[in-house]
Image (cartoon, grey):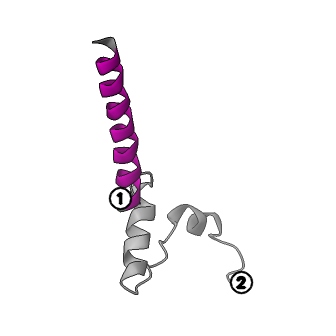
Amino acid sequence: MPIEQADQYLQYVKAQRMYATLLERYNPGMGMDEEERIRLTARRVGMDLPVEYDIASANSGEGEDRGQ
């Protein structure tokens, strides 16, 4: 009986390993953050995402070299 349980456990562990391998193979974006996944999806169909406007860096340059 213990040998049968050990064999069943071994089969279970192998199946879990195969499941994890297949999950990673067919869901490559699982480990990525949402922004990276969206960027890669756009690239897949031949598009690039627009560059986002950073209001913080735009305000830091305010008042410099305005030709006065």
Q: Is residue 1 above or below residue 68?
A: above
Mark 2, secondary structure of its residue:
loop
Q: Position of residue 28 (x, y in %)?
A: 41, 60
Mark 1, secondary structure of its residue:
loop
Mostly what secondary structure, the magenta segment?
helix
* Structural distance between the alpha carbons of marks 1 and 2: 56 Å
User: Residue shown at 40%/41% (left/top)?
Assistant: 17
User: Residue shown at 44%/51% (left/top)?
Assistant: 31
State the residue position of label 2: 68
Label 1, residues with CA under 10 Å away: few <14, some 14-19, many ≥20: few
Q: Position of residue 23 (x, y in %)?
A: 35, 52
State the residue position of label 1: 27
Closest to the observer, 53 or 22: 22
Residues at badges 1 and 2 in contact (C-beta under 8 Å)? no
Amino acid type of disc 1?
Asn
Image quadrant holding the N terminus, namely: top left
Q: Is residue 51 above or below residue 13?
A: below
Q: Position of residue 37 (x, y in %)?
A: 40, 63
Q: Residue 8 lies in magenta, yes or no?
A: yes
Disc on res. 14: none
Q: Which residues are magenta?
A: 3-25
User: Residue shown at 70%/73% (left/top)?
Assistant: 64
Q: Is residue 26 left or right of residue 57?
A: left
